[in-house]
Amino acid sequence: MARLIPLALAATLVAGPAAAGEAFLGVYAHDVDDGISYGKFEHGAQIVFGARTTALDELKFIGRARVHLLAGVNTAGGTDYVATGLSWRFPLSERFYLQPGIGVAIHDGKIDYPSPDEPGITPAERLKRLSDFRTKLDLNSRVLFEPELSIGYKATNRLSVEASWIHLSHGQLAGRYNPGVADVGLRVLYRYGLDR
């Protein structure tokens, strides 16, 4: 994963002169239980916006990946995040496509709630910490992996719609406790410039 960050940054710089790609805006259900994330700690919708390059010839050694940069803002004061990474588009038909991606994210949510098992704390403090553990999202690391998957439909040459899933977690690299957070929703994309 450490290699993806400089690769994404370099690809973004290379892609600048190409002036082609997609801008997107979407609304997502936030902190859903998707079978990987625990879900249901936070509420509100997630407004996700960002941009993605066209498939880059400069990245043909990894399958002409696209570079994405996105931000998610929670409408109820929950976790906000910014992510960047790479994605690959696979046509399913003339208009439909599948697009998996992987990246890294930084978020502003709470991390490292104190352990309820810490020796020497009072029973009242232990109960408070247990309550926090059961009711508040603790992503356990400021930097997280950001896998995502989209199914898209090209409505016109310029407009597309994607149903997408975005997941954030540390993959147990920052400890065994790894609730993760998942957002599932729809986004509208506007294609600018020319695909290569």
Image (spheres, rainbow, N blue to C red):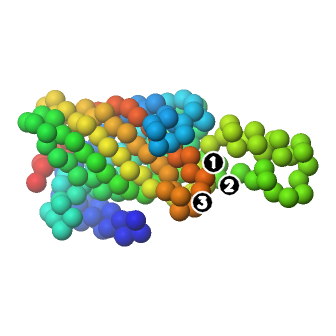
Left or right, residue 159 beside residue 103: left
10 Å crowding of disc 3: few (<14), some (14-19), many (20+): few
Q: Circle 3 sits on which residue?
A: 175
Give residue 39's quadrant in the image: top right
Write the residue at 27% across / 64% down.
11
Q: Percent position (x, y) of residue 123?
A: 90, 45
Residue 48 image position (x, y, % from top left): 41, 39
Q: Which quadrant of the figure has residue 174?
A: bottom right
Q: Which residue is mark 2?
A: 112
Amino acid bearing label 3: Gly
- Answer with the quarter of the image where residue 184 lies: top left
Q: Which residue is mark 1?
A: 138
Q: Say whether marks 2 and 1 touch (CB < 8 Å).
A: yes
How far is disc 2 from disc 3 in space, using C-alphas?
10 Å
| Residue type at the position of mark 1 | Asp
Of labels 2 and 3, the one closer to you: 3
Query: Three-letter amino acid code at disc 2?
Result: Asp
Which secondary structure lies at badge 2? loop
State yes or no: discs 2 and 3 in contact (Cβ < 8 Å): no
